[in-house]
Image (cartoon, grey):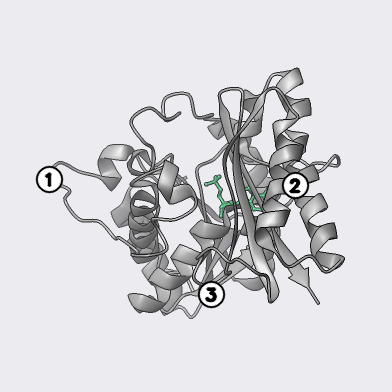
Amino acid sequence: MIRSPKKMHELCRALSRRGLKIGLVPTMGALHAGHLSLIRRARAENDRVVVSIFVNPMQFGRNEDLGRYPRTLREDSVLCRRNGVDFIFFPGVGQMYPPGFASCVQVEALSNVLCGLSRPGHFRGVATVVAKLFNIVRPDNAYFGQKDAQQARIIKRMNDDLDFGIKIHVMPIVREPDGLAMSSRNRYLTPEERRDALVLSQALRAAARMAEEGVADTARIIRRLKMIVGAKKRAHIDYISIVDEESLRPLSRIRGRALLAMAVWVGKTRLIDNAVLRVK
Ligand code: AMP
């Protein structure tokens, strides 16, 4: 495990000089099968794999769950070792944001829609920490999950706009057998909430079926989903949107493909999920 950004940087530079390909998997820890799918792909495509574990305060809002976010370093280390990770980068907050820290990366337009509306500043925090991780590790490949579709889109934009030149891979959403998208936050759910949380994936499947049957009117699909989610007493919709996959702007009709993204509060836990809808 490496804690110092400078040490991590020097080590990665030495690896690169030897011509070794580096894969980076940025995480906030509390690793689950979703993270492991990224790690395994990184393992298959690189000579060295770095997993960063950093609960990034900059991407949490004032009233969010920074304090209680699960921290399971010992279990995470075992999972990393078993899955062939070469280095865990586990910096402290003071090492990433030393006194006087004043810079940030803002990916305009993509950051103030969907989750950005209810989590102002969130994606600035994400883009800033990922830019720092990219500069520290200078990976050839970096791996992200489609679970956080907006985040993946923003990172790709940043990578292109700021000429990082890293190959960005976006891996499919890993789900529990009953359909719930895996998330470190699922462990906050009580058994009753865990049952109601299934409504997210159920709603996504209902929307996919409507699209397959030729429904292109997004307002109609969203109305149906609001009914499905609204039927669960512990679930409260933050947003349900159907947007263009590239611009993340809302669509009134689906032409070919569209991204359906949603955030739903289940009890005190905010869950997100998404799916690509296809209309022929
Ligand atoms: P996090 O630790 O939640 O910041 O997630 C780290 C990375 O794992 C992000 O790129 C996420 O999109 C990805 N990830 C989280 N959950 C899943 C999942 N269920 N399936 C695939 N990727 C995921």
Provide residue 90's location: percent of width, then percent of height.
Answer: 43, 43
Q: 121 or 162: which is nearer to us?
A: 121
The mark closer to the camera, 3 or 1, is 1
The mark closer to the camera, 2 or 1, is 2
Measure the alpha-carbon separation of dots 2 and 1.
50 Å
Mark 2 or mark 1, earlier in chain: 1
Task: Please report the residue visible at 65 percent of the width from the left and 68 percent of the height from the top.
Answer: 258
Q: Is residue 261 visible?
A: yes
Task: Please report the residue visible at 86 percent of the width from the left and 42 percent of the height from the top.
Answer: 177
Task: Please report the residue visible at 57 percent of the width from the left and 58 percent of the height from the top.
Answer: 149
Measure the alpha-carbon separation of dots 3 and 2.
47 Å
Pointer 3 with pointer 2, Cβ within 8 A:
no
Q: Which residue is mark 1?
A: 100
Q: 25 or 117: which is nearer to us?
A: 117
- 106 is higher (above) or lower (below) than 214: above
Measure the alpha-carbon separation of dots 3 and 1.
34 Å
Q: Is residue 84 visible?
A: no
Mark 3 or mark 2, earlier in chain: 3
Are there few (<14), some (14-19), or many (20+) residues within 10 Å of tag 1?
A: few
Q: Which residue is mark 2?
A: 224
Q: Secondary structure at mark 2?
A: helix
Q: Secondary structure at mark 3?
A: loop
In this image, 124 relative to 114: left or right?
Answer: left
Q: Which residue is mark 3?
A: 21
Provide residue 191's location: percent of width, then percent of height.
Answer: 75, 19
Residue 213 quadrant: bottom right
